[in-house]
Amino acid sequence: GARAAAPPRPDSARPPAAPVERETGAAPGRGLGNAEEWINAGTEALAPPLAILPAAMRVRLTYAKRGRARFISHLEMIEVIDRACRRAHLPLAFSQGHRPAPKLRFSPGLPVGAESDCELLDIDLTAVVPAIEVAARFGAFLPEGLSVLDARAIDLRAPSPEHGLAGFGYRVDLRDVLAARGADWIDARLAAFEAAASFPLLKRTGHGEKTIDARARVRRLARQGTTLEIEVAFTAAGSLKPTELLGALFELTADAARALPLYKTQAFYQASPAAAAPVAVAAAPL
């Protein structure tokens, strides 16, 4: 006789559906167009991995922060980078614990409004992926003003980008101050700072205001035409925001000091990062 139809397959036997990433208005394969769209986008429904896999490699990316992206705060940058990593479907390594998070390590945050070509990001991955491929996949989902400049594989035991930092170098566009005060006045202020044994400065912190000695935290201060070059040291007592120094040095309001075009030129380390973090794969300039 006719064979009985097979009973319907119970739901419990169906393979689990793959997690679906909810898009936030971006075209497939492209990042959102600018910083505002990234910051205002809704939270993406991205499920954590079912199992926490060990890290197989670490990639260090050097990226630029230019144009409109310079107004993204450090906390917002962490969110932007987290989204770009996930949307690129990189095999991210996650932390243990109640709320696993991607293992990402950042260089210290830039002052809002500053530009840089030397920001660092370390990404731990659970599978070996060529560093240049990581850079290309990650970079495709960055908003306008952020771009990857270099990628290299480093040892999993390498210290974080902020480990061993001795200070930063900055370049400031002084044309507005020159127009308002003149070169002689600026040079006199710089000479007085250089000759001073100390330079008290009121610093705002998360615990209120305190007075620090800015002179002890500045390694170099020199005008080259319309540009001021600054080297700020990291000390046991802390560091110094270049905008705070500019405000005190040139008698500017906080808003006027922040409006001066500021560019981070380099980071100084107590020891070579390359020596502390051996390169496993040759650098891949992009």
Image: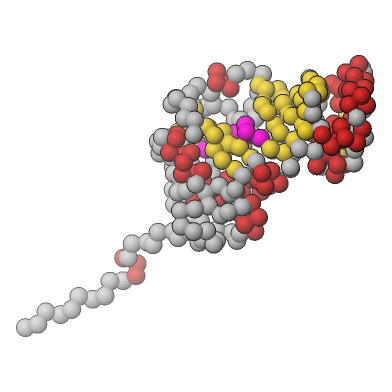
Q: Residue furthest left?
A: 1
Quarter of the figure with the N terminus: bottom left
**Quadrant position of residue 184:** top right
**Left or right: residue 231 compared with residue 87:** right
At x 52%, y 58%, the residue is 26
Say whether residue 94 is visible.
Answer: no
**Quadrant position of residue 160:** top right
Q: Residue furthest bottom?
A: 1
Compared to residue 186, the image places residue 244 above or below, namely: below
Q: Position of residue 235 (x, y in %)?
A: 77, 23
The part of the chain drawn in magenta is 116-123
Protein image colouring:
secondary structure
**Quadrant position of residue 77:** top right
Front-lying residue, 174 or 57:
174
At x 55%, y 58%, the residue is 44
Say whether residue 24 is visible.
Answer: yes
At x 75%, y 35%, the residue is 262
Count how many numbered circles sit on residues in the image.
0
**Left or right: residue 13 compared with residue 38:** left
Examine the structure image and report whether residue 212 is included in the region drawn in magenta. no
User: Main SS type for the magenta part?
Assistant: strand
Front-lying residue, 210 or 59:
59
Compared to residue 91, the image places residue 28 above or below, namely: below
